[in-house]
Image (cartoon, grey):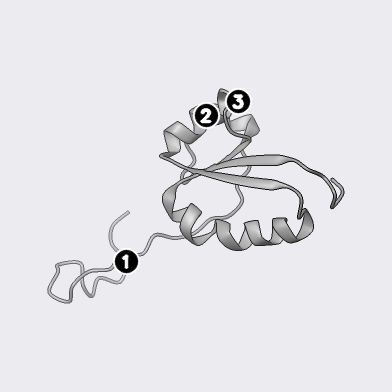
Amino acid sequence: MSPDTKATLVVGAVESLSAYVLPSHLASLRERWPKARFEVITSACAEIRDSVLAGKIDLGLVLGAESANEDDDTILATGRLVIVCAPSHPLAGVARPAS
């Protein structure tokens, strides 16, 4: 795509990704393609998958490995889940909770 491309990219993402991950990436895309339009739809994972499959959105960013068509999935990043609890909670001080 050239910098002069006038296109619209509709991205579906879960709320946490829309709020904390997408803004910096969209800023980079806007610098690269200033005439393009980027629209973010915030929804639940299942709704995002369904919208991609129905052609309502161009791409979706979801959490988890569950998919309707794994051949079309690309893992962009992985992370770990961190538990935060009060010092008086039974999990406080546990080095690694059971899997």
Which residue carries the number 1 mark? Answer: 96
Q: Nearer the viewer, residue 18 or 70?
A: 18
Instruction: Say which mark, if any, is on residue 79.
Output: none
> Looking at the picture, does residue 69 appear above or below residue 38?
above
Image spot of residue 77 (x, y percent): 58, 55
Q: Nearer the viewer, residue 54 or 9?
A: 9
Query: Counting residues from the N terminus, which is met first, the one under dot 3 or under dot 1?
Result: 3
Image spot of residue 75 (x, y percent): 60, 47
Image spot of residue 51 (x, y percent): 52, 29
How far separated are the C-alphas under marks 2 and 3? 6 Å
Image spot of residue 37 (x, y percent): 68, 46
On the question of residue 67 being in view, the answer is no
Which residue carries the number 2 mark? Answer: 51
Residue 57 lies left or right of residue 14; in this view the side is right
> Looking at the picture, does residue 74 appear above or below residue 16?
above
Question: Residue drawn 71% across and 57% down?
Answer: 30
Amino acid type at image mark 1: Arg
Amino acid type at image mark 2: Ser
How dense is the environment of label 2, judged by Cα within 10 Å: few (below 14), some, or many (20 and up)? some
**Which residue of the protein is positioned furthest toward the top in this rendering?**
54
Amino acid type at image mark 3: Gly
Where is residue 70, by image quadrant? top right
Instruction: Say which mark, if any, is on residue 55.
Output: 3
